[in-house]
Image (cartoon, rainbow, N blue to C red):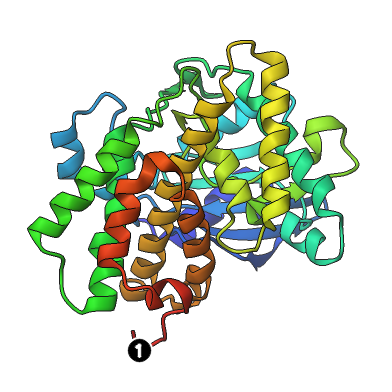
Amino acid sequence: MTDRKDLLQEFLAGAGWATGQRSPLAGDASTRRYERLTGPQGTAVLMDAPPGAEAPSCPPDAGVAERQTLGYNALARLAGPDTAPFVAIGQWLNGLGLSAPRVLAADLTHGFLLLEDLGDTLFTKVLGRGARQTDLYRAAVDTLVDLHDQTPPAPLPLPDGGHVQLSLYDATALRAEVNLLIEWFLPLITGKPVSDAVRRSYEAAWDSAFAHVIDPKPVLVLRDYHADNLIWLPERGGVARVGLLDFQDGVIGARAYDLVSLLEDARRDVPEALGDGMLSHYCRLVRARDRVFDESVFRLTYAALGAQRNTKIVGIFARLFRRDGKPQYLQYLPRVWRYLEADLNHDALVEIKSWFDAHVPRRFRTEPLGGGA
């Protein structure tokens, strides 16, 4: 069997980057690895996604039983080790005039992509240097509004003539994600697995909320649309000023999801006034384009998906700590809980709020979990 290092060298040589200098880039919470390549032709970014490093995804039309057999990635509609969705979605986004990294070379079989380097001007860094929050967040919201005006083709084409069928962000996926809280966070703070009765009451409460997240106009959901995944490109015009980095897990779902991801950012505080203002800005823009847009329904969907996403994140950060030995994510939990509790103040989510009040002691929502938790 050919060593992965040899496969990578073959890929880089075939792409004309055999002699490029390589330096690591900060990764994400997945098994993908990133490097910046520097050579006479400029710079590029290498994505290394080992095919066997994660559980597989599954065909979009797979039933719940098959998805359960394949594991979490299949249940939650994650791309897993497959790099084809990144290529197909990125190509479609670029075709809309948005700024996704162009694919310079690809080996989908072995999980290697060579990408256009959009630079280091992450929203997080630019904001940290004193840029006006309103300007950047307004640009990010404007980009979402433009994206949500479009319906992705089914299926999305690949450059080699293949295609990628996007999955629906369905109730099975949403439930698998919120179940991370009872599978990882609750056992972390209590020292024992949850009982069947607690699990049943939890899932019943969420099932009532999922009825509110069916959008009459489903769109491409990028899924991780927040300041650490957005690049500020002021030299470009209009919505192209917002560079998009993380979208390989894209699915078809509700318009509110990516807006929640942006405005309820687990890794940085989004002031309440800014979040409220940007939510209203989004609604104004969509209402001007869509005469049947119902803002009250949208705001309910926003609250329900905010609660769902933040609950998922609590579970993911607990899993990263306990399973993967990554305690750094625990520091974000109090912020995520603040967002979650604000979402649960919506009248339609009272059943979920009651469940949390009964089963998650308040001290675990207000302080970071210690390394010995």
Taking the image as shown, residue 88 lies to the left or right of residue 127, namely left
- Using the rendered image of the protein, determine whether residue 19 is visible from the camera's viewpoint: no
Task: From the top left corner, tell me how far across and down residue 124 is, in percent.
Answer: 72, 60
Taking the image as shown, residue 181 lies to the left or right of residue 98, namely left
Task: From the top left corner, tell me how far across and down residue 256 is, in percent.
Answer: 54, 34
Q: Residue at x 74, y 25 (%)?
A: 97
Taking the image as shown, residue 44 lies to the left or right of residue 245, namely right
Q: Residue at x 74, y 49 (%)?
A: 231
Residue furthest to the left: 196
- Using the image, determine if residue 102 lies above or below residue 326: above
Residue kind at label 1, given as amino acid type: Gly
Q: Residue at x 45, y 54 (%)?
A: 310
- Using the image, determine if residue 111 lies above or below residue 360: above
Q: Nearer the viewer, residue 208 or 128?
A: 208
Q: Determine which residue is flagged by label 1.
A: 372
Task: From the top left corner, tell me how far across and down residue 354 is, in percent.
Answer: 30, 55
- Using the image, determine if residue 152 lies above or below residue 233: above
Taking the image as shown, residue 230 lies to the left or right of residue 173, namely right
Task: Using the rendered view, name the quadrant where residue 253 is placed.
Answer: top left
Q: Quadrant of the N terminus?
A: bottom left
Q: Nearer the viewer, residue 26 or 278?
A: 278
Q: Quadrant of the C terminus?
A: bottom left
Q: Residue at x 28, y 77 (%)?
A: 189
Task: Using the rendered view, name the quadrant where residue 62 is placed.
Answer: top left
